[in-house]
Every structure is written in structure tokens, then in C-alpha cells.
Image (cartoon, rainbow, N blue to C red):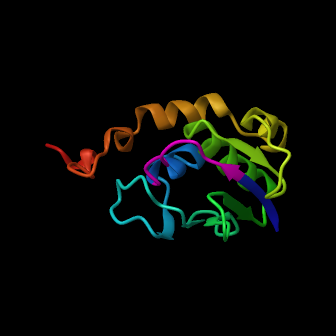
């Protein structure tokens, strides 16, 4: 199991943007977590499993006794992508240990495999969930 720690310095993104970053909005995903609403930004737990590639599983969990998060996956590339995204979105830092040393999320780029960060960032930027709010959690359903 690969683990990366994230020290988030701002609110979390809509959890659906993690899906956008990894696979795209139309990708079939099983998910679970502790978001109080789909658009909530205070979540600390997230489980994602691709329906199209069921071996692709990633989990985000709080680190007990701290404000840190741990990103876990049996696939190193997947864990590094999620840790990179969360740290970038929250102006945070990443580490391989809960005690650091803490680094810029860009240090994970070399661990992501054949993955275009630019294309993933574009998917997130154009996702309707980028505009989601607690008042309008489903902007993709507007007429």
C-alpha cells in the first residue's frame, strides 16, 4: 500500500473534482465518504473505486490526532495523483510520513506515471462541479 500525507492549508475541493482529475466527470466510480453534501468542502474521508478499472482504488482518511490527511492506494501512481491534487487545491504540502519532511506537491510529478497533469487540470477547470455550492450542489443538472 502506498501512502502520501497531505497537510491542507485551505478548504477541501468538492470531492467530485477528485474524480474529474483522475478519470473525468463521465467515468463510472463507486464512492463513499463523510461529505455532508456532495458540494461540501469539509470532508476528511473519501473512498473511490473505478468501475471501469476496478483495481484502481484510492482512499483519503484523516490522520488521528492531527489535521493531516493520508492518501492510500495499492497503486503508487494513483495515490500520488490524488495527493498532488489535494495539496495543490488546498495550498498544502505533501510528505511520505506524517512527521515530514514536507514538500511542494510538484515533487510527486515523477511518480504519477503516464498521466497528463495539464489534461487533468483542464478536466477540473471545465467540470460543472467546480461551480458547485451548498445552495446549488448539482450545477450539471441545470436546464
Q: 38 or 26, which lies in front?
A: 38
**Residue farthest along the front direction in this orientation:** 65
Q: Is 81 situated above or below 55?
A: above
Q: Residue at x 61, y 46 (%)?
A: 8
Image coordinates for residue 53, horizontal then vertical, percent: 64, 63
Residue 75: image quadrant is bottom right
Image coordinates for residue 131, horizontal then vertical, percent: 32, 38
**Residue farthest along the left direction in this orientation:** 143
Q: Residue at x 81, y 35 (%)?
A: 107
Q: Is 139 situated above or below 35?
A: above
Q: Which residues are magenta?
A: 6-15
Q: Residue at x 17, y 44 (%)?
A: 142
Please indicate whether residue 57 sits to the left or right of residue 41 in the image: right
- Secondary structure that dominates the magenta span: loop
Q: For the N terminus, which image quadrant?
A: bottom right
Residue 56: image quadrant is bottom right
Image coordinates for residue 125, horizontal then vertical, percent: 45, 31
Image coordinates for residue 11, horizontal then vertical, percent: 48, 46
Q: 64 or 143, which lies in front?
A: 64
Residue 73: image quadrant is bottom right
- Check residue 121 for magenta coloring: no
- Check residue 13 for magenta coloring: yes
Q: For the C terminus, which image quadrant?
A: top left
Please indicate whether residue 63 sits to the left or right of residue 142 in the image: right
Amino acid at each position: 500500500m502506498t501512502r502520501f500525507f497531505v497537510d491542507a492549508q485551505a478548504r477541501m475541493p468538492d470531492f467530485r473534482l477528485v474524480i474529474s482529475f483522475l478519470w473525468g466527470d463521465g467515468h463510472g466510480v463507486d464512492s463513499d465518504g463523510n461529505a455532508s453534501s456532495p458540494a461540501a468542502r469539509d470532508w476528511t474521508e473519501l473512498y473511490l473505486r473505478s468501475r471501469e478499472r476496478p483495481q484502481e482504488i484510492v482512499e483519503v482518511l484523516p490522520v488521528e490526532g492531527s489535521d493531516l490527511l493520508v492518501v492510500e492506494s495499492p497503486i503508487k501512481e494513483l495515490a500520488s495523483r490524488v495527493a498532488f491534487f489535494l495539496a495543490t487545491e488546498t495550498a498544502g504540502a505533501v510528505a511520505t510520513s506524517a512527521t515530514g519532511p514536507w514538500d511542494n506537491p510538484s515533487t510527486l510529478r515523477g511518480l504519477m506515471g503516464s498521466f497528463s497533469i495539464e489534461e487533468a487540470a483542464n478536466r477540473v477547470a471545465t467540470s460543472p462541479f467546480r461551480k458547485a455550492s451548498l445552495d446549488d450542489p448539482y450545477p450539471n443538472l441545470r436546464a
